[in-house]
Image (cartoon, rainbow, N blue to C red):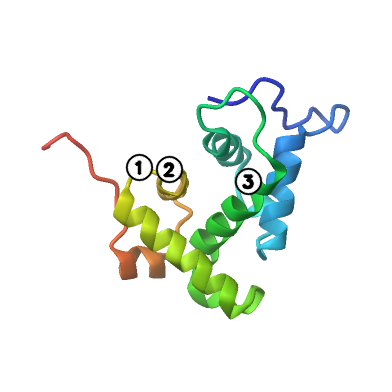
């Protein structure tokens, strides 16, 4: 659920909400231009970052989410070119842990990126990333 007060702006007359600006900054910091992520995906990501809390997440919650989203879109090689090897290792460990756990905030972000068609094919192949359904058909 998108937080009350979340706004993408309107014809440049009303500004973007703080949570979307923070996510955009986190994406930029991780080497991914925010325009590469559709606004609907960013709105959903902000909801995931906020979780079940009613108050706004801490500003420190956005950089890890932006980093994971950037890894998903860019793939490991491009992410490494845009960031340090240490950042790549940390983001890769988070991705692997999320895929193993399956019920974390990171796992929800990865699922969001998968459904949006934004996960790099190399990551899909390497980690066999797919959405499982309960429907046998």
Asked if residue 120 shows in the view, the reply is: no
Calculate the distance from the C-alpha at mark 2 to the C-alpha at mark 1. 7 Å
In the image, residue 62 sits, relative to residue 129, either above or below, namely above
What is the residue that sits farthest to the right in this orientation?
A: 13
Task: Determine the secondary structure under disc 1.
Answer: loop
Name the residue at 35% across, 42% down: 103
Q: Report crowding for label 3: few under 14, some 14 to 19, many 20 or more residues within 10 A (C-alpha).
A: some
Instruction: Count residues near mark 2 (Cα–Cα under 10 Å), then give few for <14, some for 14-19, many for 20+.
Output: some
Does residue 50 sit above or below 97 in this rendering? above
Please identify the quarter of the rendering in which residue 21 is found.
top right
Residue at position x 79%, y 27% in the image: 10
Q: Disc 2 vs disc 1: which is toward the camera? A: 1
Q: Which residue is mark 3?
A: 61
As drawn, 122 above or below 114: below
Is the residue marked by circle 1 packed among few (<14), some (14-19), or many (20+) residues within 10 Å? few
Q: Nearer the viewer, residue 56 or 68?
A: 56
**Separation of residues labelled 3 and 1 (CA atoms):** 17 Å
In the picture, measured across the screen, residue 56 lies left or right of residue 69, that is: right
Q: Is residue 122 left or right of residue 51?
A: left
**Could you say where residue 6 lies in the image, as x and y percent from the top left?**
69, 27
> SS for tag 3?
helix
Residue furthest to the top: 4
Tell me the residue at 70%/39% (across/down): 20
Residue at the spot of label 1: 103
Look at the numbered disc 2 and give the secondary structure of its residue. Answer: helix
Q: Which mark is residue 78?
A: none
Residue 108: image tag: 2
The answer, for residue 19, to whether it is visible in the render is: yes
Q: Quadrant of residue 93?
A: bottom left
């Amino acid at each position: 659920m998108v937080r009350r007060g979340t706004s993408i702006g309107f014809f440049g007359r009303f500004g973007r909400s703080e949570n979307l600006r923070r996510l955009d900054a986190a994406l930029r910091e991780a080497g991914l231009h925010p325009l590469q992520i559709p606004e609907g995906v960013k709105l959903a990501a902000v909801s995931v970052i906020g979780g079940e809390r009613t108050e706004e997440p801490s500003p420190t919650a956005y950089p890890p989410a932006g980093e994971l989203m950037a890894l998903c879109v860019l793939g490991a090689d491009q992410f490494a070119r845009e960031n340090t090897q240490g950042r790549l290792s940390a983001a890769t460990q988070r991705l692997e842990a999320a895929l193993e756990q399956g019920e974390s905030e990171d796992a929800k972000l990865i699922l969001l990126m998968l459904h949006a068609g934004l996960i790099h094919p190399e990551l899909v192949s390497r980690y066999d990333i797919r959405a499982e359904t309960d429907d046998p058909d």
